[in-house]
Amino acid sequence: MSSGGSAQESDEPGESGERPEGVLARPRKPWRKAGTALIGCAISAFFLWLLLRGLDLDVLLRDFAQVDLAVLAVSLIPLAFSVVVLMWRSLLLLKSFTKLTSWTVAKSLLISLGGNTVLPMRLGELLRVDFLARTGRARFSACLAVVAVERILDAVVLFLFFAGIVAFALSDTPDATAIIVVGALSIGGLLAVVAIARRPQHFVEILTRASRPLGKRISRFVSDNAHAFAEGLGSLSNNRRATAVFAFSIAFWLVEAVMMYIWLIACRVDVPPYSAAMIIVFIAFGTLIPSAPAGVGTYHYFAALALSFFGVSPERAAVAAIVAHAMGTAPLTIAALPALAQEIIGAIRRK
């Protein structure tokens, strides 16, 4: 399935006459890179310690041996479909300022998902933005706006999932102050980007005026990028397209919940179906904490924490968390490796 045009994957300059810079092209001191990596690994190690402390090793190994591999294989179907749903959503958001094929957008998603697995600080997201800007001959800021909208929509949908589960399904409500704060901020962010999409000139004008005291050069830079960012939100100015984008966001997370529940079945975790959505919310919140690539440690701890609210034993919860993380990252990372390697090598060469 393709969008209404074709893409030319090229490193040639875009319409602005400027070649988009690679996201890895900015020099950075080696000690800072090493320091960031060490801090992330230390945080991951701490959360892994929290997950595994006090567990009975024999019980843990027994629970691992009971994992149903055939059921795990079934989960690859919704995993692949989830990428297709994300592709449809991105095509709608990108349609307002560039034309790309379905394959190009799907490739960008694989670059992002794979990059987030092997690179720290969610650099896969920026690799994706850079890839979209170059292949779509678009401004970096416009593509960045698309990714920002996607993340905001994801946060809003997950917050709605959490609110629904707490209101209608859970009798013992967990302390969710942090999740509520993140949800409120996400809803505020969504309202803000919709307002920018409907009144882009106001947004550009406000930022231009605010930056004038900093000098003409900086003011021009802010104005140009604010205009490109507002352009990237253009799809939200169309009611039908905005509704479809939100519907695809809901559909994606429903598919993710189905996939999570399949993993729980494979790990012989006896919990109600809606628990899968709660686990996803906790994982999403936990992976906001800086850690090693792929959210190692934070993902596992918060998945097991969510399962503890449903009376799952610590050993079986740990097994489910480890299996879910492996199934959610390994297949997509393997599929993404060729494109991801090409992007990283290209970014280094453009340095």
Image: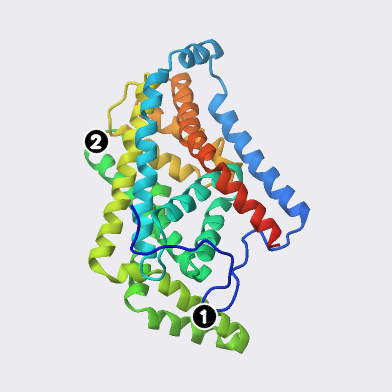
Of the pair 111 and 266, the residue shown nearer to us: 111
From where the camera sits, is residue 103 visible? yes
User: Which residue does the image show at 50% across and 87% down from the upper left?
Assistant: 209
The amino acid marked with disc number 1 is Asp
What quarter of the picture does the C terminus occupy?
Answer: bottom right
Q: State the SS at label 1.
A: helix
Instruction: Determine whether label 1 and label 2 are within 8 Å by CB.
Output: no
User: Which residue does the image show at 49% across and 70% down from the upper left?
Assistant: 138
Q: Which residue is mark 1?
A: 224
User: Which residue does the image show at 33% across and 44% down from the upper left?
Assistant: 253
From where the camera sits, is residue 162 visible? no
From the top left corner, tell me how far across and down residue 279 is, in percent.
38, 36
Of the pair 312 and 248, the residue shown nearer to us: 248
Number of labels in the image equals 2
From the top left corner, tell me how far across and down residue 250 is, in percent.
29, 49
235 in relation to 28, above or below:
below
Of the pair 280 and 116, the residue shown nearer to us: 116
The amino acid marked with disc number 2 is Ala
Q: Which residue is mark 2?
A: 169
295 in relation to 310, above or below:
below
335 in relation to 245, above or below:
above
User: Which residue does the image show at 22% across and 39% down from the upper left?
Assistant: 168
Classify mark 1: residues with Cα within 10 Å, few (<14), some (14-19) or many (20+). some
* Label number found at residue 58: none
Q: Choose mark 1 or mark 2, whichever is in front.
A: 1
Of the pair 23 and 32, the residue shown nearer to us: 23
From the top left corner, tell me how far across and down residue 144 is, in percent.
49, 64
From the viewer's perspective, tell me whether residue 37 is left or right of residue 72. right
Instruction: Name which of mark 1 and mark 2 comes first in the sequence.
Output: 2
Classify mark 2: residues with Cα within 10 Å, few (<14), some (14-19) or many (20+). few
